[in-house]
Image (cartoon, rainbow, N blue to C red):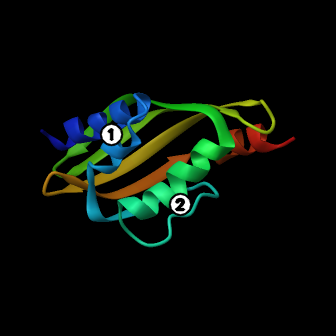
Amino acid sequence: MTPTDIVRAFYDRLAAGDAPGALGLMAPDIEWTTMWHYKVEGRGPAAVAEGLFKPLMAEWASFSLAPTGFIAEGETVVSLGDFRGVHRATGKTAEARYAHVWTLKDGKIARFRQYIDTLAVAEARRA
């Protein structure tokens, strides 16, 4: 699979509710950086599950990541897309554009950086 295929597979597995499958695409020492209040402490898929997946699923009644385009050069893939989520506590919907920068190594996701419209997310979180 190409780097873009691997990134697409990550989004597909998340959309299908297959978090273990998405985590399986990651390198054992993945570095994960988000621009939200979620913080992944340390490295590795278990750290991503604890610092991002679990709190994200607890806070949002539903959410989706819909990539609209991919730009790739070598082992780096940038995905552009839309986050849509319904906040569990407020019931408000967030619609935010994002750019995700993925770095792959040896067929695994080694690094992730997220850039997102944090104001749109914050508005949905505000009671």
Q: In this figure, which residue is indicated by the disc labeled 1?
A: 10
Q: Is residue 20 left or right of residue 37?
A: left
Q: Which mark is residue 39?
A: none
Q: Is residue 116 visible?
A: yes
Q: In terms of secondary structure, where does tag 2 sit?
A: helix
Q: Residue at x 34, y 50 (%)?
A: 23
Nearest the eye: 117 or 107: 107
What crowding class fits label 1: few (fewer than 14 Cα within 10 Å), some (14-19), or many (20 or more)?
many
Residue at image coords 53%, 60%: 51
Q: Is residue 42 shown left or right of residue 122?
A: left
- Rounded to the nearest angstrom, the CA distance separating label 2 from label 1 is 17 Å
Give the quarter of the figure containing the C terminus: top right
Q: Is residue 117 visible?
A: no
- Residue 95 in the image: state x and y as whole percent: 63, 30
Residue identifier under label 2: 51
As drawn, which residue projects farthest toward the bottom?
42
Task: Assign a secondary structure to mark 1.
Answer: helix
Tell me the amino acid under the disc marked 2.
Gly
Choose between 45 and 102: the one closer to the eye: 45
Toward which corner of the image does residue 26 lie, by quadrant? bottom left
